[in-house]
Amino acid sequence: LPREDILSQLRALPARVRQYDAYIFVQDNTKKILAGNSILGDLKTDALKERHWKVIFSRFGIHVGMAELTLGMLWDGGLLTKKKDMAEILSTAQGEMALEEFLKQVRDQWGKRELELVLYQNRVRLIRGWDVLFQTLDDHMGGLALMKSSPYYRQVQEFQEEGNLWEDRLTRLRAIFDAWINVQRRWVYLENIFFGGADIKAQLPAEWP
């Protein structure tokens, strides 16, 4: 039954029943169980990784493997008295998950991205869509810099290693693209000069026999 339905059924009992100590005992324990179940429900999040479970086990004094973990162990470890600890662990896990998702976005974007090419003058293919390319680069480089200021970044070695790796890669990629677009613009400009006008074509044999 939903939480409110259980409590409603208890409150719906006759007044003479609600006066007994047994009723108060059952009501109080039901509230505790429902509160504990709410905490247990939060543990279903995908944000919790092995490192977070190790912290949970440590806080609860649990010394078994993950496969041997039971709900009773969490209850016996003081589930309701460790709500603050659980909230802290879950908050950390959610913060770290946000960094994981950002790194995955960077990894997928630049690991699978294909340059958009267009045939120019039926002679050569040039890159187009530079604005989107540079904007994405700047967004990800800015995100990596911002990520380094996160307390969650400093807690996980894998984040630091992958963050530094992609920061170096994107910095070098930005330098390559800067040079590439410069060469492409110059080539287009000179191509129009040397191949665009009949008068220049006619002069070229005389200038360079």
Image (tube, grey):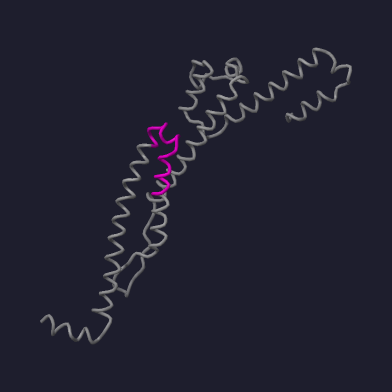
In this rendered view, identify the residue nearer to me: 22 or 151: 151
- 109 w.r.t. 56: above or below: below
The location of residue 40, given as percent across then percent down, is 61, 26
Tell whether position 44 is magenta: no
Decide whether residue 147 is among the magenta residues.
yes
The residue at 52%/28% (across/down) is: 89
Q: In this view, which residue lies farthest toward the top? A: 21
**Of all residues shown, which one is farthest toward the front?**
149
Q: Residue at x 33, y 72 (%)?
A: 120
Quadrant in which the N terminus appears: top right
Q: Kindly identify the residue that appears in the image at 54 percent across and 20 percent down.
A: 69
Q: Is residue 4 above or below residue 82?
A: below
Reply above or below: 129 against 160.
below
Q: Which quadrant holds residue 144? A: top left
Please name the residue shown 25% across and 86% down the image.
Answer: 198
Q: Position of residue 115 (x, y in %)?
A: 36, 59
Q: Which residues are magenta?
A: 141-159
Q: Examine the residues drawn in magenta and state their main secondary structure.
A: helix
